Amino acid sequence: MASRRQFFTDAEIRALAARSDWMGALLVAHCWAVIFGSMALFVWWPNVLTFLFAFVLIGSRQLGLVILMHDAAHNALFKTPWLNEFTGDYLCGRPVLAELDAYRRYHLKHHRYTQTDEDPDLVLSKPFPTTRASLRRKFLRDLTGRTGLRQRSEQFAHWMQMGGDKDAVEEAQKLTQKFNGPGLGRSLLVNLILFAGLAATGHWWLYPVLWILPMLTWYQFVLRVRNIAEHGAVERSDNPLRNVRTTKAGLVMRALLAPYWVNYHLEHHLVMHVPCWRLKKMHQRMLELGHRDAMEIGESYADVLRVAGSKAA
């Protein structure tokens, strides 16, 4: 297995991994500004187009909150430890019913055992490549809310069987384990505060319509696309340049599918405590060092999804 020191000196790693309280605060503020700004746009100018714009953008920023929680799980969101823990949990994770501590325990095991039988995320990447029909079914479950309902409510697990798809049931259980710990009550409290804040503006309906519905649908879709792009249809090996993928993303894809530099996933696995906003610089350094041909790089999300759905029917 390759070591990160084959690619970077200790001095380079220290520089790349330096945290910033100001940058962490800016990223979290940006994420919430996009969410509330999207809601405000629809309230100010209500029509089908502004609703769809707000719906999609909010669902994508819910993924953005998870990405920032992910940084906090690696102690990389803030330099100050208590800010990292509090903000990563209560301002990033809890609003989307995720818990920082539970995610950290799960996720660090994924880093330790990437693409091995002990990788807890293997159930999410192992099915790929799959058939185009199977990929369509997965996306349909996400966009219709079936995946989200299974993950969010235990009561649905007894009677909603995903059309008899056992893989979908296993996947939903794994994602529930990944994000949810025993502190669900705190997540509900944070959501109650969010609801109360929207109600205080006279627009309580924004919570179910432009928070819960995106969380159950579009957020699930972009979360799946992210998982596929990162580890779907890559090598089952311990080579950190081939068992994980970085995907090129333009402005639109960064807004909709890859917020906060999450597309630079190969670089993240090389040095997992590098803050997300320095991953692009890390990627450019890898290219300068001549490692491009050895790296698993997707030319676009569309290309990655074509590979993920390339199995013969």
Image: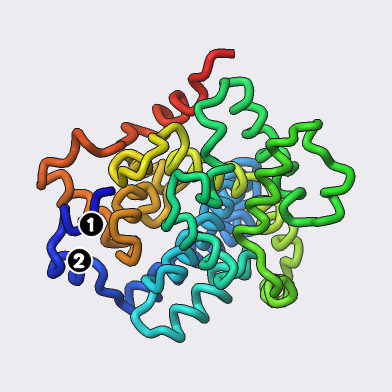
Instruction: Return the residue at label 2.
Output: 13
Drawn side of residue 149 relative to residue 269, left or right: right
Residue 181: where, in percent of width, then height? 66, 68
Residue at 68 percent across and 72 percent down: it is 187
Q: Residues within 10 Å of mark 1 (few under 14, many from 20)?
A: some
Instruction: Give the label on residue 135, or none.
Output: none
The tag earlier along the polypeptide, 2 or 1, is: 1
Estimate how packed mark 2 is, as few (under 14), some (14 to 19) or many (20 or more) residues with alpha carbons within 10 Å.
some
> Closer to the camera, 218 or 187?
187
Q: Quadrant of residue 211?
A: bottom right
Relative to residue 54, is residue 184 drawn left or right?
Answer: right
Rendered image: mark on residue 4: 1
Quadrant assignment for the C terminus = top right
The answer to whether the residues at label 2 and label 1 have Cβ atoms under 8 Å apart is yes
Residue 222 in the image, given as x and y percentages of width and height:
54, 44
> Which residue is at a point 31% across and 32% down the rendered structure image?
299
Is 118 drawn above or below residue 68 in the view shown? above
Quick one: SS at disc 1? Answer: helix
Looking at the image, which residue is at 44% across and 41% down? 231
Across and down, in percent, residue 253 comes to 41, 42
At x 89%, y 44%, the residue is 159
Q: Can I make out residue 184 in this image?
A: yes
The residue lying furthest to the right in this view is: 159
How many labels sit on residues? 2
